[in-house]
Image: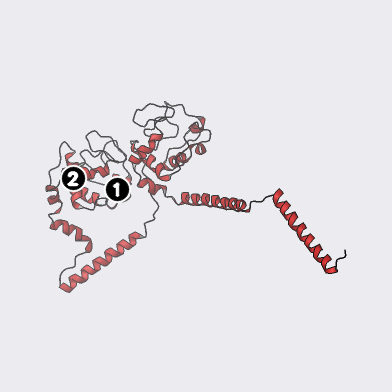
Amino acid sequence: MRFSVLEQIGASLLICAWAIYGSHFLGETLVHVDMKGTAAASHGDKSESATEESASAEAEEVDFAALLASADAAAGEKVFGKCKSCHTIEAGGENKVGPNLHNVVGANIASKDSFSYSDALRGLGGVWEYERLNTFLTNPKAYAAGTKMSFAGLSKPDQRAAVIAYLRQNSENPPPLPEPKEAAAPAEPQAAAEKVADSEKAEESAEKEGAEAKPAEEAPAAEQAAGGGLAALLASGDVESGKKVFNKCKSCHSAENGGKHKVGPNLWSIVGRGKAKAEGFNYSGAFTGLKGEWTYEDLDVYLTDPKAFAPGNKMTFAGLKDPKQRADVILFLREQSDSPLPLP
């Protein structure tokens, strides 16, 4: 049986095609490459790397001083529940697996004589400053290599800030809080410009009416005077309401007779007491420079804007803008005294 040249060529091509297909099929059978898995793995590596970079960037952006300024010591007490199996915190508390932590903020590292510290902690030196506490609580074993402390650390900055605020509350003379970054600084010139603009409008209006111009800054004082002023607010104030408002202050201040100093001084007999005169409390320079006694008027101005009254003070409370709330709080503080000043 004879084949034509074209038939021979066609048969050759068909055999080649089958040979190529067969080798490909055999290769796929023996060595199967999961391209989807490879792509997914590659994507996973990139995703993990991106997550780490994001976490690193987030850590760099956190202003820990700002977190401390707004930290809730009560929330820190709850987080501290994780530490209670190894540490006590009350004054005179016993050492457990770890040392008693009363007065730890600002204390020298490994300074409690009644506790036997590991070499890892004894070799650190220095003071438990806020930033050191933050770094230590993030990863104790990384900060003090060789420490016997089994606690893995707190990865969330807000939890660390809350715990440190709680530790600070249980330290009798803690160092001042660090200053937050000046992120809001640009707002101040704007506020000043708005005050100037308001003042200029008031002057223009007064000129048109032929009356003497009155600066805009005096408006709140004028409103208070129209309502009888501070004396009238104090005369009609509510001590129980002031006691409730004072709850905002209790994380930093005690007010009872013989109460201990916290982050701020005990406020017993504050009305009429000399400024920065609470015995046993370490005031900042912003307060030690103040003269005179705490009159009703001074307390009212101070509670309106603490930082404006004593520039540079470390008190984080923004103030009370409601005149009635201020009067009620002052009445409550007035009652926390054996010999309260007569009302104005």
Q: Nearer the viewer, residue 196 or 101?
A: 101
Q: Which residue does the image show at 56% across and 50% down from the upper left? A: 44
Q: Residue furthest right?
A: 2
- In this rendering, the answer to whether 213 lies above or below 232 is below
Side of 150 where 229 appears, left or right:
left
Tag 2–tag 1 contact (CB < 8 Å): no
Q: Residues within 10 Å of mark 1 (few under 14, many from 20)?
A: some
Q: Residues within 10 Å of mark 2 (few under 14, many from 20)?
A: some
Q: Residue furthest bottom?
A: 208
- In this rendering, the answer to whether 170 lies above or below 241 is above
Quarter in which the N terminus is drawn: bottom right
* Residue 241 at x, y percent in the picture: 18, 45
* Residue 33 at x, y percent in the picture: 66, 51
Q: Is residue 49 visible?
A: yes
Identify the residue position indicated by label 1 in the image: 317
Which kind of residue does numbered mark 2 sit on? Ser
Q: CA distance from mark 2 to mark 1?
A: 19 Å
Identify the residue position indicated by label 2 in the image: 241
Task: Answer with the quarter of the image where residue 210 lies.
Answer: bottom left
* Residue 18 at x, y percent in the picture: 76, 58
Helix, strand or loop under label 1: loop
Q: Which residue does the image show at 59% across and 50% down from the upper left? A: 41
Q: Which residue does the image show at 16% across and 56% down from the upper left? A: 224
Helix, strand or loop under label 2: helix
Which kind of residue does numbered mark 1 sit on? Phe
Name which of mark 2 and mark 1 comes first in the sequence.
Answer: 2
Q: Nearer the viewer, residue 200 or 48?
A: 48
- In this rendering, the answer to whether 277 lies above or below 222 is above
Q: Which residue does the image show at 58% across and 50% down from the upper left? A: 45
Mark seen at residue 198: none
